[in-house]
Amino acid sequence: MKTGSKHRVIISGGGTGGHIFPAISIANAIRIKDPGVEILFVGALGRMEMDKVPAAGYRIIGLPIAGLRRDLSLRGIITNLGLPVRLARSVTAAGRIIRDFRPTVAVGVGGYASGPMLWVARKNKIPYILQEQNSFAGKTNKMLAAGARYICVAYPGMEQFFPASKVILTGNPIRKDIRPASEQEKKEALLHFGLDPGKRTLLITGGSLGAGTLNRCVREYLPRSGDHSVQILWQCGKNGLSLAEEALKEHPGVPVFVHEFIARMDLAYAAADVVVSRAGAGSISEFCAAGKACIFVPSPNVAEDHQTHNALALVKENAGWMVTDKDAPVSLMEKALELIFNDSQRQRLSANILKLSRPHAAEQIASLLLEL
């Protein structure tokens, strides 16, 4: 491995926490291996990486790129019509970044900015690695695969999408503080959130941006919550906060604790007996590392329905349950209560999902990158 401060690394991608937090984990691992390294993030203007990356101590430049909108609203149509212009401007901006920063290597973690940035990197003969987080490869990574030195994946069998000689099974990078909690750590986590150690705890999270279906399920559960023997820690996202607070005002005695965003997810996992979540790849990797019994509700609004593929990969290993987004309003909360009181099934899911953990993914990807 090279040493010293010769490396200048671009990390490109973002859009959701599922892309951003793994990217930051890779950056942290690179910096540990080479303290003199220079790292530049490239994201999409207006997306959450523009706030989260600087908060983690790294510089970021935004491209004017946007994703294809799948709705047929007037706003969606207008946005899609402007995509060619945004793409051209992003390619131009990426070229300027290459000239100014002079990277020696690059890594793409998925998200809007990854495509134009790595396309320009390839044109400039800059070696790069792709990090594919999902069990069903995205279109951008498939298009960029031919020029990649390595393609780091989280699931077996990804050779169906990529050249087998480039595929390396690393797992997804996660935050260092995610691991199975001891009983003492669980008590401290419950105290942190003001939760009752005598109740079972259900964590419901739609990811860093929230999830409308999951929020609706919690709101509709409040009037029929029964004996209150289960408490809910609820990450609702920015868009769900006002409705959540209104619902809780109407049912003040229900032990539901709502947060727009939970910064200490390590403590949230430690507190939880069962987790209900979307099936984003980054979240799943954290659940594996924490050894949590989970019910997945895949988002229907993602490319190639990749969250369903992610969830089914765990269901196949008896490492999680799945409820479809369509069925969730009818059956999700009942399924969650069934699991939280079934100790043997919960322990079985926890043990099986922990077997899928790959806690050293960030370090492995960092090593591969610095060896290019």
Image: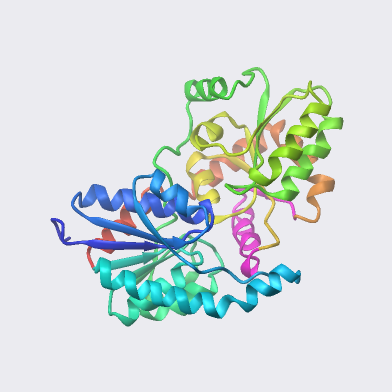
Residue 18 picture location, percent across and down = 52, 53
In this view, the residue in front, 96 or 222, is 96
The image position of residue 372, as x and y in percent, is 24, 68
* Residue at 59%, 59% in the rendered image: 310
Q: Which residue extends farthest left?
A: 4
Residue 205 screen position, x and y as percent: 63, 42
- Where 284 falls versus 169 (above or below)? above
Q: Quadrant of the N terminus?
A: bottom left
Residue 148 among those drawn in magenta? no
On screen, residue 132 versus residue 77, left or right, reads left
235 up-or-down from 111: above or below: above
Residue shown at the point (63%, 70%) measured from the top left = 304
Compared across the picture, whether 71 is left or right of 96 comes to right
- By secondary structure, the bulk of the magenta-drawn segment is best described as helix
Q: Identify whether 268 is placed above or below 371.
A: above
Q: How is the image coloured?
A: rainbow
Taking the spot 54% from the left edge, 70% from the top edge, the residue there is 138
Of the pair 58 and 274, the residue shown nearer to us: 58
Provide the residue span drawn in magenta.
Answer: 302-324
* Residue at image point 55% right, 45% down: 352
Answer whether residue 149 is visible to the viewer in this image.
no
